[in-house]
Image (tube, rainbow, N blue to C red):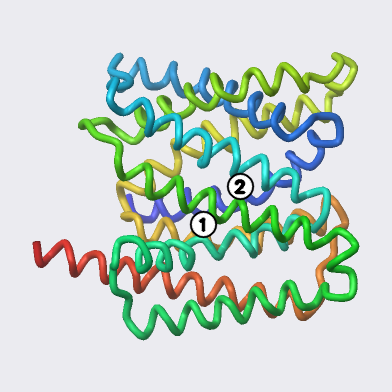
Amino acid sequence: MRKRAYILMTAIVFMWGYEYVAAKHALESLEPIVLVFLKYLIALLCLILFKLKIDGTSFIIKKDVPYYIICAIFGEIVYFWAEYTAMDYIPIALITIILAFVPVASVITEKLIYKVRANAKIYMGIFFCIIGISFVVGADFSVLFSGRIIGYLLSLVAVLSWNAYNFVTRKLTGNFTELTLTVNQLIMTVIISAPFAIAKRPPLTAFTPQVVGGIMYLGIISAALGFLMYIFALKILGPTPTALFSNFLPITAALFGWVSLHEVILPLQILGGILVIIAGSFVIREKGRLEDQRLCKK
């Protein structure tokens, strides 16, 4: 079972790496908020049928509605709007490198808000992660203020948004499975994004075969199938190993960006990306170890 879970997580890293290419093609004709709406509408239709079959008809508890709304706003709408908009300014590989900063942002937030202590190893990982990010951004200094800074700022918005989502998700109550929690969040995402998507709707001629193919890939393969595979692997491997796999997205994103979109990043940015991946993975592993120790003490 563990071998199968590792294979699935490897496949997910490639599936989610190609997601950026599919999104890039779709965004040639669609506004980011429209793509977010269509992606999650398709994913919701797929997952809700799967949920009704294996997970019953239990849905949202009334007192959890505000949390689901916040999760939908930060975890899906703002996060992917910022990520998709950033694609207009910087290569997708650089976006995913910045997104690998999420575990560091999580540690910093826990320290500032929840007073959760980290150890020297985690702080060392944070230091090298910041050095790696400085390499990535610094290599673009000559063109930074001609537009690329917007891409980096939007990527940072995505990091902060996902960090907020992670902490709000902890507030959700009830003995619901991950599938039910996700379906509930997608329902809120579709409801909230629908008015904005309708206002920005493109003409029917915008839906070329390439655009439709990108939307279907995002909704069915990346979001729906990717989530089911991730949940299976999560149950077998636990949160820390699965999080470590997702931290390698910059590699597959850079590969697909180079092959399909002819995007090129500088050698110093590659070095910075390697530093961020290694340091971020170290922070995830060490953070997981500390959390396991805290649970054992309770």
Q: Secondary structure at mark 1?
A: helix
Residue neighbourhood size for the residue with mark 2, other residues' Cα within 10 Å, grouped as few (<14), some (14–19), many (≥20): many
Quarter where residue 34 is shown: top right
- Disc 1 marks which amino acid? Ser
5 lies above or below 195: below
- Disc 2 marks which amino acid? Trp
- Labelled disc at residue 16: 2
Can you name the residue that lies furthest to the left here? 298
Please report contact status of discs 1 and 2: CB closer than 8 Å, yes or no: yes
75 lies above or below 189: below
User: Position of 274 compared to 45: left or right?
Assistant: right
The structure residue drawn at horizontal position 78% and vertical position 49%, both measured from the top left corner, is: 87
Say which residue label 1 marks.
Answer: 246
Quarter where residue 249 is shown: bottom right
Where does the image place residue 195, in percent across and percent down from the top left?
Answer: 65, 18
Where does the image place residue 287, in percent across and percent down from the top left?
Answer: 34, 69
The structure residue drawn at horizontal position 41% and vertical position 62%, both measured from the top left corner, is: 109
